[in-house]
Image (spheres, helix red, strand yellow):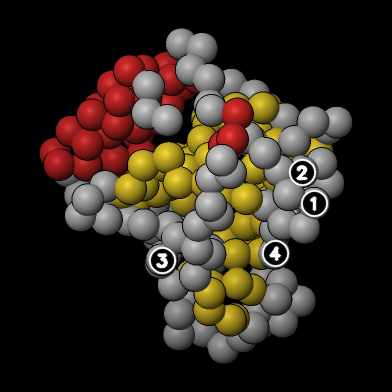
Amino acid sequence: MITKRLRRFIEDVDRVVADTDDQYELTARISPLMAELLTDGYRLPDECTRPSPDHNMTYPLYIAPDDSWCLASVVWDVDQRTPVHGHETWGVVGIYSGIEHEVRFLKPSATAPAAPLTPAGETRWRAGQVTICCTTDDDVHAVVAEGDVPTIGIHVYGGNIGTIQRRRYDPATGAVTWFASGWDPVPA
């Protein structure tokens, strides 16, 4: 599953992660690497592009041996949406196909009482575009897959996103529940 081109991307990200622990520098340096991966014509394996009719799929492409970062293919079928959620880490996303409609919210203070979330804007990301999806102070959003093909993103996260305890928000009340997303098995 790891091609020569993907191996080079992994090695480049490994160097960045080893070089700094500043999340803003990390995301700023990884974003152009992601853009290059997308423009170089990298092709995800077919088995990592398959949607599910029930929920978005998160396929692991690479997890650093020390869990310092991971790489995933995240696939939403047409019209699927996520709940409002956070990541609790930094992240960079490159849109591989489809349209990702992102709705952002201001991240509530950990000490503030629960209150409705404050909208912070919307963006439609299209194939070939790269976004810094999250830093620990700015990572509350929901995603909707738009268009007539599945939306597929190549995601790089600080840590192992499949095991990180993350927040899910009720946007109307600000109530928080915790979850770990886990990983979907790559189909044979």
Q: CA distance from mark 4 to mark 1?
A: 16 Å
The mark closer to the camera, 1 or 2, is 1
Q: In the rendered structure, which disc, 3 or 4, sits on the residue that comes first in sequence? A: 4
Residue 158 as seen in the image, left or right of residue 168: left
Q: CA distance from mark 2 to mark 4?
A: 15 Å
On the question of residue 35 being in view, the answer is yes
Q: In the rendered structure, which disc, 2 or 4, sits on the residue that comes first in sequence? A: 2
Compared to residue 63, the image places residue 38 above or below, namely above
Query: Mark 1 falls on what kind of element?
Result: loop
Q: Which residue is mark 2?
A: 77
Classify 10 Å Cα crowding around label 4: few (below 14), some (14-19), many (20 and above).
few
Circles 2, 4 touching at the beta carbon (< 8 Å): no
Q: Which residue is mark 3?
A: 163
Q: Which residue is mark 4?
A: 83
The mark closer to the camera, 4 or 1, is 1
- Rendered location of residue 44, percent (x, y): 53, 26
- Rendered location of residue 90, percent (x, y): 39, 51
